[in-house]
């Protein structure tokens, strides 16, 4: 995990509300268990960018990389498929539900 903070120049729509932009870089842990222990780690996917809840006057952008593995045949595999973004947006699922005020 890595965190970077940058000054907000306010050039993008709605960015004027935030004084800084907080970038949080997250990498998926190696969570192989049982029969998947035979898979060979093969780096990470390209990062998925997600706009998340603001934190204390900071716009928050998550950069999430998923782990890739290779099986015995050399094919690339991604073990877990998590819904990282709300459909049709760059927002996290929870933040999208919050904005829609959709009681689930």
Image (cartoon, rainbow, N blue to C red):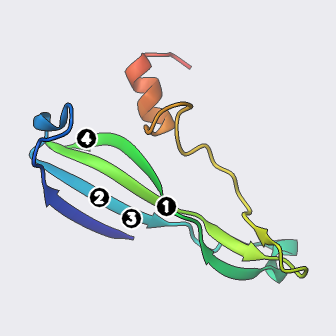
Mark found first going from the N terminus, 4 or 3: 3
Relative horizontal placement of residue 4, taking residue 93 as reference (left or right): left
Q: Nearer the viewer, residue 18 or 13?
A: 13
Quadrant containing the C terminus in the rendered view: top right
Mark found first going from the N terminus, 1 or 4: 1
Q: Residue 15 in the image: state x and y as whole percent.
A: 17, 38
Q: Residues within 10 Å of mark 3 (few under 14, many from 20)?
A: some
Q: Which mark is residue 54?
A: 4
Q: Which mark is residue 47?
A: 1
Q: Is the Cβ of the residue at disc 2 closer than 8 Å to that at disc 3?
A: yes
In the rendered image, the vertical position of residue 13 relative to residue 68, given as above or below: above
Q: Secondary structure at mark 4?
A: strand
Q: Nearer the viewer, mark 3 or mark 1?
A: 1
Q: Which mark is residue 23?
A: 2
CA distance for labels 3 and 1? 9 Å
Q: Secondary structure at mark 1?
A: loop
Q: Residue at x 38, y 22 (%)?
A: 99
Q: Residue 95 in the image: state x and y as whole percent.
A: 41, 33
To which residue does mark 3 refer?
A: 25
In the rendered image, the vertical position of residue 8 relative to residue 75, given as above or below: above
CA distance for labels 4 and 3? 16 Å
Q: Nearer the viewer, mark 2 or mark 1?
A: 1
CA distance for labels 2 and 1? 12 Å
CA distance for labels 1 and 4? 20 Å
């Amino acid at each position: 995990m890595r965190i970077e903070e940058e000054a907000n120049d306010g050039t993008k729509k709605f960015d004027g509300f935030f004084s800084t932009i907080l970038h949080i870089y997250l990498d998926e842990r190696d969570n192989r268990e049982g029969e998947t222990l035979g898979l060979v780690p093969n780096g990470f996917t390209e990062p998925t960018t997600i706009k998340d809840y603001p934190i204390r006057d900071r716009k928050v952008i998550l950069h999430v990389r998923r782990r890739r593995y290779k099986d015995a045949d050399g094919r690339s595999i991604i073990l877990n498929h998590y819904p990282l973004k709300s459909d049709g947006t760059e927002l996290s699922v929870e933040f999208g539900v919050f904005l829609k005020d959709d009681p689930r």
